[in-house]
Amino acid sequence: MKYIDHEVDWFDYCQSDTWSNLWIDDFFLQLGHDRANSKMDVYWCQPGKSFCDGLHLMSCDADIVLMIVATVEHKNLVLLVDHDADIVLLNASQPPSSQLLPATACSS
């Protein structure tokens, strides 16, 4: 997997009891991105997993609940934002809709 022009930003002191998709949208606005007017997919990297086996598309409130449950044991959560075409698959023979990460991209 290759990341093009990646950036890392931290948001500290987030409260799990008020965590929601609205917070994520607000963080994007603070970074100059409007998720409502652009194509951005947000993935959560589940604790204890890598980007190859732990990315979970954030698509509904149930996904937020999973993140809240994870904060009982894990205080740092990682979100990956795909700005339309930033994720490039190493195995170009597979159509993009088949999988986010083909097994060949995660093999060492």
Image (cartoon, rainbow, N blue to C red):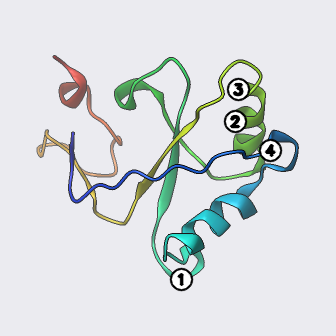
Q: Which residue lies under the disc numbered 1?
A: 37
Q: Which residue lies under the disc numbered 4?
A: 15
* Badge nearest the viewer, 4 or 2: 4
* Badge nearest the viewer, 1 or 4: 4
The structure residue drawn at horizontal position 77% and vertical position 49%, both measured from the top left corner, is 61
Amino acid carrying label 4: it is: Gln
Give how far across and how far down residue 72 sits, in percent: 77, 22
Amino acid carrying label 1: it is: Asn
Asked which secondary structure carries label 4, the reply is loop
Residues at marks 3 and 4 touching, judged by CB atoms closer than 8 Å: no
The structure residue drawn at horizontal position 73% and vertical position 46%, both measured from the top left corner, is 14
Q: Earlier in the sequence, mark 1 or mark 4?
A: 4
Label 1 – label 4 distance at C-alpha = 26 Å
Q: Residues within 10 Å of mark 2 (few under 14, many from 20)?
A: many
Amino acid carrying label 3: it is: Ala
Label 4 – label 2 distance at C-alpha = 12 Å
